Every structure is written in C-alpha cells, then in structure tokens.
Image (tube, coloured by chain):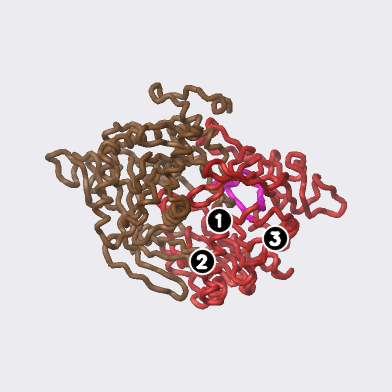
Chain colours: A red, B brown
Amino acid sequence: MPELRKDPIIGRWVIISTDRARRPSSFSSMPRPREEASMCPFCPGNEAHTPPEVFAYRQPNSVPNRPGWRVRVISNKFPALVIEGNLSRQAKGLYDQMNGIGAHEVIIETPHHGRDMVDMTDEEIRDVLWIYRERMLDLARDSRFKYILIFKNHGEAAGASLEHEHSQLIATPIIPKRVTEELDGSRQYYSFKERCIFCDIIRQEIMEYERIVKDYDAFISFQPFASRFPFETWIIPKPHQSSFLEMSDQEYLILAAALKDTLGRIKLALNNPAFNFILHTRPISKDSHEYFHWHIEIFPKVTKMAGFEWGSGFYINPTSPEEAASFLRGIDMNGRHYSGQTGSASNG
Amino acid sequence: MPELRKDPIIGRWVIISTDRARRPSSFSSMPRPREEASMCPFCPGNEAHTPPEVFAYRQPNSVPNRPGWRVRVISNKFPALVIEGNLSRQAKGLYDQMNGIGAHEVIIETPHHGRDMVDMTDEEIRDVLWIYRERMLDLARDSRFKYILIFKNHGEAAGASLEHEHSQLIATPIIPKRVTEELDGSRQYYSFKERCIFCDIIRQEIMEYERIVKDYDAFISFQPFASRFPFETWIIPKPHQSSFLEMSDQEYLILAAALKDTLGRIKLALNNPAFNFILHTRPISKDSHEYFHWHIEIFPKVTKMAGFEWGSGFYINPTSPEEAASFLRGIDMNGRHYSGQTGSASNG
C-alpha cells in the first residue's frame, strides 16, 4: 500500500508509492518508446489489459469491459492511492505518516487513439466533462475523502505515460496543500473586501482586456497577471460558482467549446506542446462557497523548473502574459492559422 | 527591467523577465545544441564574452577579465533581477507589482570545461564555497536585499543553459515564499518544543540510520523522510548553525569533501543525472537564528512533475528514501563502483 508521509518542516505531504516502485537501476535517461496503437491498453478491444471499468458511456447493447464505449473510466493500474482500507495515522518519532487511502481513476476520453480534445466535437468533450461530474458526485459520498482533484497530463514532457488521450482523478483523505493555499488566500480577501477575489479579477480582466484570450459569454479564457509559465491560461466561469458541479447543462456544453477553442489556440501557437490542465474546484465540504471560484488552469510545458524556482518558490517567466494573450487572440481558429493581427507578437 | 508580479490569491511572486524575453515563435521542442568548449563563454580566454567580473580568485599577477582565475564571479548576462535602481512598489487595480531589483550572479567554479564538482579536489570545492561566502557577505550590506539564494542547475534537464560547471546567486528584495514556509514551520515547532526541528531530525536520523547516506562527522548526508523525489539528498551540519556563514574554516573544507562524496555517489548511482542543489540558509536578518538550521538540498532530475503534483502540491515518489539511502551507502567511492552490500537495492 502507498504510504503518505508529511514533511515535518513545511507540512507538505509526499506519497511513497510502492506500487509504482522504481529501483535505482531503472532510472534511465533514455526516453521511453511510444506505444503502438495496437498495443495501447486504452484502445477498444484491449479492455482486458486495464483494471475493470468503474463507469462508462456506452452504446445501448454493449457490455462493460468490452468495446462500444464513448468515454470509459477505470481504476489506475498503478494507483498513487488505493481505495480499500481505513484511514490510519501514526507517528514515527517526530515524523507523521498515514496509509495511502484514496481513489485514483483514469478517464479515457475517446476510443480513438491519436485524437485529442482539439479534434473532438463539443458534444464529445461535454461528455468527458459530464463524466468528471458523475465520478465526483459518486466519490463525494465516501466520507473518507475531503478533496477530488481532476487533471490531465498531455505529452511525455507533462508526465503522460500513455499517449491515448486521457485525464485522471484522485480523491484524497486530506485537502492538498496547494488547494489550501488558494482557499486561505481567497478567504482572507473575502473577509477584507466581502467580495470574491476571482470575481474581482474577472471584472478587471474584462475591463483591461489585454490578458483576455477569448470571451465565451459564460466563461473567459485569459492569461493570469502573475503567470508562472509562458502561455499559462485559465478558463473561468463569469458568474460566481465555487464548484465545477454548479454548472447548468448548457454551461457544460459552452465550457466544452471554450476548452476546445483555447486548447486549439495553444496547440497552434506552440506547435502541439505538452501541457497539464488542472481543475481547481472547492473541497467536498461547502464551507468555501462564498469566496472560492472554480476554474481550469492550463500550462504548456515550454520552460523548465530550475534551481531558482525550486529554492525560492518564485517563478521566472520569459514571456509576458499580455504578449501571450495577444498572440493567442490573433489566431484564426476557422482558418486554423496565425493571422498576425497583433504587431508585437508577430515581430518576435 | 524585469517586473515582479504577485499572484493575488496565494501571494506567489513571479518575475516577468523582459531581458530573457522569448517570443511565441521561439518555443521549439528541439533540444538546444551543446556549445563547443572553444565557444564557451565561461572558458579562460573567452572572458570578453561575459559581463565584467565581479570577483575572482586569481593568480598573483593576473588581471580581471583575463585568464589566470581559479573561480570567477560575473553578473548574469540575462539577469532575472537587476542591480541598478530603487525599489518601487505599486498597485495595478487589485494587482501588485514591483520593479525587478536584485542581484543575479554566476559563479564559474573551475576554468576546466567538462570538469564537475565530483572531479574537483576538496580544496577547489572549498574555494567555491568560500566565494559563495564572500559574495553573500558583500551583498548582505545592501539594505535593499532581504535574502540571498545560491543554487546550481547541473545538466539541461535541470535548467542549465551552459554545461561549463557553474552555480548562481540571486539576491532578492523580499524573502521568497519557499523560504518563508520553512521559516514559519521551524518557528512553530520551536515555539512548541523549544528545540530546533532540524536538530531533532538529525538526532532521529542518526539513531535510525536507515536514511543516512554517510556521516561526515561535522555533517551528515541523508534522504529526508518525506523525500519529494527519488534520491533527494540533504547535507546538514550536525551542530546548530542557522547560516552558511557560521562555519569555521575547517568546516568549509569538510563540507567540500562531503559534497564531493555525496554528488559522486549520486553520479554513479544514476549514471550522471541532471540535478539541482539549493543552499537553504537563513535570511540576512538574524531573527531566525534559534530555530532555523542551514542545509543543502540536492535533487536529481529523474522524474517529471505532472498534473497531480501541480494541482495538489503533493509529490508522488516512486523510490523510498530508505531504499535510495541503502543504495547510495553501498557505493564504494574508492573503487568508484556499486559494491552491492544491500540486498534490496541490488535485486531490483
């Protein structure tokens, strides 16, 4: 079973993952070969090579763990946290440890190997978002869990080990440190201003417009003022919603279109970069409803974290968010090329 | 001038570095070609290709910005922060920004291209550590600075852009978030226990011994209990010292030998991996003397940060620190090979 260990100084948790164990001799600097489509465990026909299906959207007459699915959710074959067992916390001298209880699922977004979100239809992406929702609602009923994190690693540089398009879900028995920081920060702002900080950011961004990538009516996509990375892009709902689960049916479809368009711009701008996206939503408990505002953070992997970032927690970003936004706005998604409307971005 | 921007939600600072500006079209996924030694700006004879020398250890009759140096400090050609100017803070709507005042220096550790710390003598490494000390003492007199961070990026995967062995120094006008977290955590422990948490960790590690890589009398090197990364290794002085500047002359030499030995073990174990090392020392102000304890953190780059780490602040580590320590202890540094004393590590 994986083991959770807490850094005694700064309180950061680490998962020592025995199921993913890598021996010292296995650290090769050679890139792994990419799997062939016929060998891909996420392709239809290869369902037997994955752990059993947790949930799927399927054709009416198809059966679980066989072809006929449109979106398929399975347990991760090498889970960072495991679902069976009771929470147990203990001390080891001055250290703290916990057994690695949680859920770790994989959402296979499409049966088509090599197809990514940019190639999918709005409705297909909506189904992926909808299945996120169904899994979150189901896992939220398990009282051991405090937070459900959904994310995507796209491309090897972003940590993806299989190229067939998928995202992941992890349910954790504690609220992760990174989430706590956001909750704490937005609660402090709320207690001072009595307004949601994200709502204030949205108003300022729409007014200034220089960091907006696109306005999708119910959502905006924009480059945050203090972007850590070149082309870091957030998609956020304009109305105040603390949870991804608060959207209307129609909003899921608009978000699907917004995600497709934004990812498409990034793909064109940076020549199909590796990227991560992370869904930031409130914890299962509703305490943070007033001050937290859900959103999606996308960051392409075009720079490397180095000693300065690791040592300071500062980031050095060599591309201003204003320039990145201008470049992404200038992409013609109908013709699917860069139309060069913005002088500063095309003169580089 | 670089611009510091503060994330309004979690308070993280980002440097938007205009001097390092990268246009969207410059993000290629191709690795950069490695420089030839003859083209290396850090090699003797090429001094004119770097910014002027700030400080150096030189042969008696040699002159600045010419060959004859053993260790050479220059300003970074593409500084993340710049030394000229006064601090100025301002609001931009709800956002906070600051001009990018600071110092960013490069310490060229050896005139010999291709030679790394493992190949250097103890005395040569001692001189590098000593020059860190001289630069820190000098910059600490500048009242604009609150913290001085020293780090090394070794290898392209760790963010090094030149392969000639060097380290870097950044002086910042604010205490970085990552440093503040460590100070806060160790202060809390001290106020509760009236003991330094690092001193307690050292005692427990020596008693348990399973995470110790080597005991160098005045220092230990060990794998922290909650290691974020495989083979994350810390070197820490056994006596309570809050600052790198508190060592005796003799201790600088012992640290040099410890660093050479520890980096040598990691180099052999992981086949010359890219790595970062970061000097964690207290801020220029002495407030934290009682509860902070300086140390060096080394982490080889053998895994990738992925969505889960970014989204949660948790880390998933596939190699237990106990196994990594056992493997590193089993390396015979005289014969410079792995001697396989530890069953668990050699059976992998």
Q: Is residue A319 magenta?
A: no
Q: What whole-number distance in Å separates the C-alpha atoms at marks 3 and 2?
A: 26 Å
Q: What whole-number distance in Å separates the C-alpha atoms at marks 1 and 3?
A: 25 Å
- Name the residue: 54% across, 53% down: B313
Please say if B287 is above or below B106: below
Q: Are marks 1 and 3 in contact (CB under 8 Å)?
A: no
- Name the residue: 45% across, 38% down: B203
In the image, which disc is placed on residue A177? 1
Q: Is residue A159 magenta?
A: yes
Q: What whole-number distance in Å separates the C-alpha atoms at marks 1 and 2?
A: 14 Å
- Name the residue: 60% across, 57% down: A278
Q: Quadrant of the N terminus of chain A?
A: top right
Residue under pointer 3: A129
Q: Position of residue A20 (x, y in %)?
A: 62, 38
Residue interval drawn in magenta: A149-171
Please say if A22 is above or below A216: above
Please say if A197 is above or below A71: below
Residue under pointer 2: B9
Q: Going by the image, does B345 lie left or right of B146? A: right
User: Label 3 amino acid?
Assistant: Leu
Chain for numbered disc 2: B
* SS for dot 1: helix
Please say if A300 is above or below B331: below
Q: Position of residue A45 (x, y in %)?
A: 77, 42
